[in-house]
């Protein structure tokens, strides 16, 4: 991914991942295109190499590279039985992150960030809207991660 804009507040990332076999016969490869906005970064006075980003927000689109998932409803289902794609998900997220700049300028990466984000897909948002029996854990996802900043 890359950071850009005024004070590097915008980030665009292309992520490649996988889902282990778990309850399936094979591993699934996933691709995600993610756009993030970080309105402000607060440096810590007692630790000048550290900063806190109290709000990150954005959206991402993900897909699974497996022919068992589809973008258009297969003919084996009655017309309009499913009104959504199983191959592509659009998500909104909110989160926070903490970043430490590394002093060693010869290192491969210039900084490391720890982040978390709370997200919801468009399908889960529609499901949650009219179903009061669903709990937030049924439609929200929580993710934790490390991000290595490679270039200045």
Image (tube, rainbow, N blue to C red):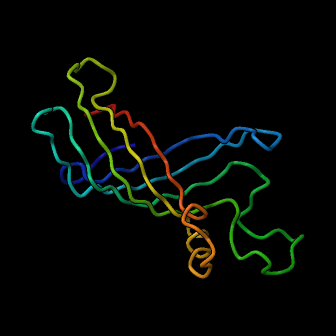
Is residue 3 toward the left or the right of residue 124 in the image?
left
Residue 4 rendering spot, x and y as whole percentages: 27, 49
Residue extending furthest toward the right: 76
Residue situated in front as seen by the camera: 94 or 62? 94
Quarter of the N terminus within the rendering: top left
For the C terminus, the image quarter is top left
Front-lying residue, 62 or 54: 54
The answer to which quarter of the image holds residue 62 is bottom right
Q: Is residue 58 above or below residue 109?
A: below
Residue at 23% across, 31% down: 101
**Quarter residue 105 falls in:** top left
Give above or below for 96 relative to 43. Answer: below
- Please state the horizontal and vertical placement of residue 137, each as a whole percent of the image: 57, 60
Name the residue rendered at 36%, 39% in the picture.
114
Give the vertical position of 132 relative to 30 (above or below).
below
Q: Residue at x 46, y 63 (%)?
A: 92
């Amino acid at each position: 991914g890359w950071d850009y804009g005024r004070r590097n507040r915008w980030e665009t990332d292309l992520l490649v991942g996988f889902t282990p076999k778990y309850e399936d016969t094979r591993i699934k490869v996933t691709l995600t295109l993610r756009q993030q906005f970080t309105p402000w970064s607060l440096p810590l006075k007692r630790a000048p190499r550290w900063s806190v980003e109290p709000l990150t927000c954005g959206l991402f689109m993900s897909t699974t590279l497996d022919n068992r998932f589809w973008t258009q409803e297969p003919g084996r289902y009655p017309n309009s039985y499913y009104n959504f794609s199983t191959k592509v998900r659009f998500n909104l997220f909110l989160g926070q992150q903490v970043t430490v700049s590394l002093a060693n300028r010869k290192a491969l990466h210039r900084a490391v960030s720890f982040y978390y984000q709370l997200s919801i897909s468009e399908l889960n948002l529609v499901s949650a809207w009219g179903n009061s029996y669903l709990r937030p854990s049924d439609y929200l996802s929580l993710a934790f991660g490390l991000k290595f900043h490679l270039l200045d």
